[in-house]
Image (cartoon, grey):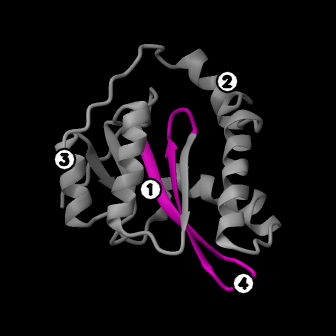
Amino acid sequence: MHRPRPQPATTARYVWAYDFVFDACANGQQLKCLTVIDEYTRECLAIDVAGSIRSWRVIEVLSRLVSLHGAPRYLRSDNGPEFVSRAILKWAARHGMDMALSDPGKPWQNGADESFNGKLRDECLSLEWFRTRTEAKVVIEQWRRHYNAIRPHSSLAYLTPNEFKPRYCSTEATEAVLQD
């Protein structure tokens, strides 16, 4: 498979990176969190929390994000089966997005999302003992909003993603077109 290597993002919606983070609740329920970030703005676009996430659910989350924000040029991920399924590759191609898959065993090639996932673990998952998956969804969404609106980022000159985006990104409204 051809593995395009996009240059570092110089605008919003150029590269969205996504991956999984795993955890468990006090009641034994497994947590699988799909994280999606914009590499340029560092905005966390979504954290989908479930017990299991298959490729069809990844497509649902990405479709919702494309409807809200417009489509990125590239989707960057590792080679997990949910990310390289025939369904997701066809979906991305149909919407004009190229896949930027990291080489096997090289997580640093998806460094922006790996870094984000480390922050999610250190600042949220490791500090909480979720009783249920429902509680985890609520707390993780609160943390995501805090991450975007309150928490400054050194890579953004100590602005939050919500402060950075309107200052340094095009203000043109983007029309998202999903064709099924």
Q: CA distance from mark 4 to mark 2?
A: 38 Å
User: Which residue was labeled with disc 2?
Assistant: 163
| Highlighted range, magenta | 16-43
User: Which residue was labeled with disc 1?
Assistant: 109
- Residue at x 43%, y 43% (from the top left corner): 16
Circle 1: element type: helix
Amino acid on which the number 4 mark rests in the picture? Asn
Sequence-wise, which precedes: disc 1 or disc 4?
4
- Residue at x 70%, y 77% (from the top left corner): 25
Foreground mark, 1 or 4, reads 4
The image quadrant of residue 10 is top left
Foreground mark, 4 or 3, reads 4
Please state, as top left, top right, bottom left or bottom right, where the C terminus lies in the image: top left
Q: Are marks 1 and 4 in contact (CB under 8 Å)?
A: no
Circle 3: element type: helix
**Residue 27: which numbered mark, if any?**
4
